[in-house]
Amino acid sequence: MMRGSATIGTTWTVDFDLDVGHGDLRPGGTQSELGVVVRHATRPTWLLGWTAWLFLVLPARAEDGGRGLDVYFIDVMGGAATLIVTPERESVLIDSGWPGNEDRDPKRIVAALRAAGCERLDHLVTTHWHVDHFGGVSGLSKLVEIGHYWDRGLPEDHDPAIDYPEGPSERDPLGAAYRRASMGKRTALKPGDSLPLRGETKAVVLAAGGRVLPAAPGSAANPACAEAPSPQPTDKSDNARSLVLRFRFGKFDFLDCGDLTWNVEQALVCPSDRIGPIDLYQVTHHGMDISNNPALLKTISPTVAIMNNGPRKGGSAATVERLRAIPTIRAAYQLHRNAGTKPEENAPAELIANRGQDGGEFIHVSVRPGGERFTVQIGAAGATREFESR
Ligand SMILES: [Zn+2]
């Protein structure tokens, strides 16, 4: 696998190669809704009219009545864009993909929002200041109304406890675009903060700016730390400063660590665990092996892992192997097959959303009311697998 770094403009350095795909916005996102409509097809056609429109406009409902929580892992070709939609249809996007490519990534995000039945984006969270995580803001803010911006802070916030080794500078076009779009509606998050969501969905910040949530007084030592690996050299990049959020919906827990790296990952679970068991894990840092510390994986022991890799970014064979070593994981999905590793160093074909170079297919997780069960589906029409929360 090719590895290195690239400098974009004067300020932005990204970990690996910039995937320049040629994917266009794909239609989709209405087939599952259409599936619901089809189940009503035995009614007289004169009764169908408004009912059909209701199901086309509103998102799919859980079959056992009431709405659940939806999570979409949007394919932004090795960047990050994860959309969470609560039962109240409040929308939270974590990271906004790459800039450029005629707004390919903002268009894919808007398609997922529409598939979830949302007209606007209520919250945009940016985990850290790398271009594959906030580069899409400029294009996205022109395509859809964004209610509030949440991030790990900007240099002008003047928090003496946090540094900004990679900006973003006000002179950088993307840094300037982010500031323009978020002016007057932006908040910096700290460990322990929560997003102000309506209803029963809770989103808690576990790490920000390289700091982790303090351990609760009297918390037990984590046995997984006895076999924790050695620390790696201090990561001076913005990755180590990523926001970490845990979403909780009834029994269901989802963890998104952005591009957090080894040593801070370990600080989250050692000597005591601040995270708890996780049902759905976004494989950190696109599946790169300088993240996904085995002590963290063993501690959170997820049931389903979803990797937002690109065809030539992330998806490291070592990470795939580490995930296979976690006995609780029943399915480890990938947004792309890694073109640089062997087939056996990838997920099984049926768990890979995009086989071609262009991509564009999302992975949709639908959590039932109460959070006790969830399904994972590739795109709007792929096969569905069901899992139980722990
Ligand atoms: Zn990244």
Image: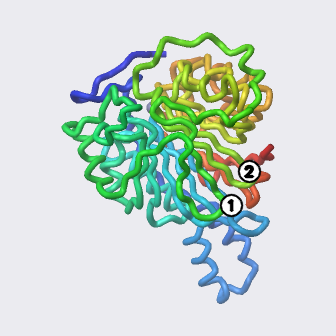
Q: Is 153 located above or below residue 292 in the figure? A: below
**Residue 234 position within the rendered picture, expressed as x and y whole percent measured from the top left:** 47, 15
Q: Amino acid at mark 2?
A: Phe
Under circle 2, the secondary element is strand
**255 and 228: which is toward the camera:** 228
Q: Residues within 10 Å of mark 1 (few under 14, many from 20)?
A: many
Q: Is 133 located above or below residue 86 in the figure? A: above
**224 and 114: which is toward the camera:** 224
Q: Is 357 located above or below residue 340 in the figure? A: below
The residue shown at (42%, 40%) is: 152
Ligand 1 shows up in which quadrant of the image?
top left
The residue shown at (40%, 32%) is: 162
Query: What is the spatial separation of the Cα atoms under label 2 and label 1, in whole angstroms?
Result: 9 Å
Quarter occupied by residue 273: top right
Q: Are marks 2 and 1 in contact (CB under 8 Å)?
A: yes
The residue that label 2 is drawn on is: 374
Quarter occupied by residue 302: top right
Q: Amino acid at mark 1?
A: Gly
Q: Which mark is residue 68?
A: 1
Outermost residue, bottom side: 46
Q: Which mark is residue 238?
A: none
Outermost residue, left side: 171
- Is the C terminus in the top left, top right, bottom left or bottom right quadrant? top right
Q: Earlier in the sequence, mark 2 or mark 1?
A: 1
**41 and 229: which is toward the camera:** 229
